Amino acid sequence: MKTSLIKILFYYPDIDQGNGGIRQYALNLLKSLDEIANDKWQLWVYHDLKDPEVLQIVNNSTHCVLVQSDNIFTAKAKRNNRLRHRIGALCQFLIGRVPYTFRQRNLLDDFIEENDIDYVHVPYQFCPDIKKSTKLITTLHDVQELHYPKNFTPKERAYRAEMYYRCAQNSHRIVVSYAHVAHDIVNYFDVPSERIVVLLLNMKNLWFSAFEKQQPQGKLKEFQTSPYLFYPANF
């Protein structure tokens, strides 16, 4: 039986600083969720990279529980899934169908069901393979590739197009930081505006606050070849 406790799976398995501003956003969002959480909230943080800042938030929180692939894709679960696959293949050969008991399962779905997860929040443009009945919330940051296609390879543009479309189709709510991003998603992906939430996170105490009073020292060689003076997403 469902309890009154709201359980949120914060899906952040393998994002690092190489992903630029996405990591900064995800950390800030996780901090914000933890700060406003109360006794009716439980945050499951799915994270594998052992990012020290993520671990610090989880360890100092009374609302966060760290989850890793080993907890979801356990050896036992994988073994049972392989067994179901083999028995299912035999059933398909003998009787022409696979009974539900022997169908392969999505192990992430199993974890969500076993722990009564109410919402899955992905803080970047990715749509995990979960049941459509699960309430998925995704943060979509921009559609740069549509405005500046030359900055992306054909493979990157294809991936982003597919992933944005999947997020648009499967998300219960889509979070964006700015109204112009919401406008783009409505126009390019035919998403009803009522499914989009424009929400800018608290911009205080971000990583670059420590550098506000410092003066530039000398010249950076990169300035001689780069068209950018400052790229705040990935300093």
Image: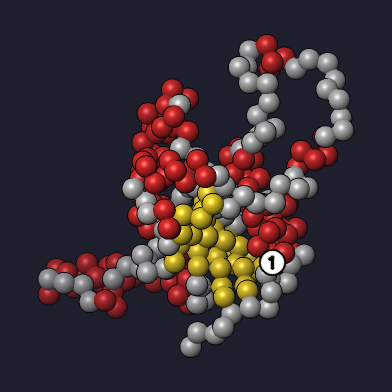
Q: Position of residue 83 (x, y in %)?
A: 33, 70
Q: Is residue 210 visible?
A: yes
Using residue 132 as the reference point, say whether residue 55 is left or right of it.
right
Q: Position of residue 180 (x, y in %)?
A: 50, 40
Q: On the image, which quarter does residue 3 sit in?
A: bottom right
Q: Is residue 164 above or below residue 58?
A: above
Up/down of 229 relative to 132, above or below: above
The residue sitting at 63% across, 78% down in the picture is 40
What residue sits 37% from the left and 28% below the top? 154
- Report x, y in % for residue 221: 72, 14
Q: How does the figure colour the protein chain or chains?
A: secondary structure
Q: Is residue 78 visible?
A: no
Badge 1 element? helix
Q: Amino acid at mark 1?
A: Ile
- In the displayed structure image, the side of residue 81 where residue 90 appears, left or right: left
Vertically, is 215 above or below 194?
above
Q: Quadrant of residue 147?
A: top left
Residue at image location 26% in from the left, 76% down from the top: 100
Which quadrant is the C terminus positioned in? top right
> Residue at image x 49%, y 42%?
181
- Residue at label 1? 36
Looking at the picture, how far across and down is residue 222, in whole percent? 68, 17
Q: In the image shown, does 140 or 72 lie closer to the viewer?
A: 140
